[in-house]
Amino acid sequence: MSPFLNQNGIRTFGQNQSGRGAATGEAAAPFRAEPRFKANNRRIRLIIGSQETNFSLTNVSSSGAAGTSEHPLLCDQRVRLIFEGREEIIGIIRWVREMAVGIQFVQPLPPHLVQGPGSSAMPDRAPRYKIARTATIQGEFGPVDAVIRNVSSRGLLIETRQPLRIGQDLEIRCGRMLPFNGQVRWVNGGQAGLLLMLPIALDEFEQQTAEAVI
């Protein structure tokens, strides 16, 4: 049996042991419901109230988009997006990372706008697994505590009280796993996304970090 399939055929990652002795699988993060398309900084207009600004799309799907704005935006703001041909759709800002934002559309975006000028299909993302592992990170500072919240063969989502910045190189230690390196790709409050310098084997990660489960 695959190490990531339980007896019911459900994708899992290891088994967390609760204080009562019950086992709970660490489930794979859900896959996106529809394909995303790389937008190559396709320019559209974004309107909040009476303010209008340029918005550069980095990727787009029928349910949402990510991009950068020329003006600061806030989570949960309702915006109007003006696409080519003056076609308009309403969206809600779901995340903000410096000038980059993620927007969820209120209504599905028509296919001809999803695959707009300069768009190209993005490669499938490596499966991510929701986990909870204690770890330490070290960069231009001494070792500090962190918690790994999800993992794929190419990246991590971590939580830490240590201030981090985009582009920062880190060494990560977790359980009995040999130290491995990653680069900070985004920061949002106490969370950060890391791109690993070299892919890791998930079966080895599961075995070598079992003692770090929380």
Image: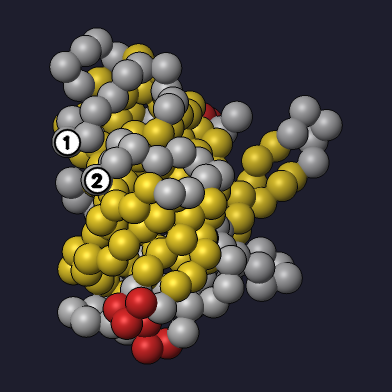
Front residue of 98/79: it is 79
Locate the N terminus and report the quarter of the image it occupies.
bottom right
Q: Residue at x 35, y 17 (%)?
A: 162
Q: Residue at x 55, y 36 (%)?
A: 132
Front residue of 26/201: it is 26
Front residue of 175/136: it is 136
Residue under numbered circle 2 = 70
Residue 56, given in percent of the width and then of the height, sits at: 24, 59
Q: In terms of secondary structure, where does tag 2 sit? A: loop
Kindly identify which numbered label has been placed on residue 167.
Answer: 1
Q: In terms of secondary structure, where does tag 1 sit? A: loop
User: In which quarter of the view is residue 37 placed?
Assistant: bottom left
Residue 181, given in percent of the width and then of the height, sits at: 21, 37
Q: Residue at x 73, y 70 (%)?
A: 8
- Near mark 2 (Cα within 10 A), the count class, few <14, some 14-19 or many ≥20, is few
**Residue that protrudes farthest toward the bottom in the picture:** 112
Q: CA distance from mark 1 to mark 2?
A: 21 Å
Task: Please name the amino acid that badge 1 sits on.
Answer: Gly
Task: Please name the amino acid that badge 2 sits on.
Answer: Glu
Residue 70, given in percent of the width and then of the height, sits at: 24, 45
Front residue of 109/127: it is 109
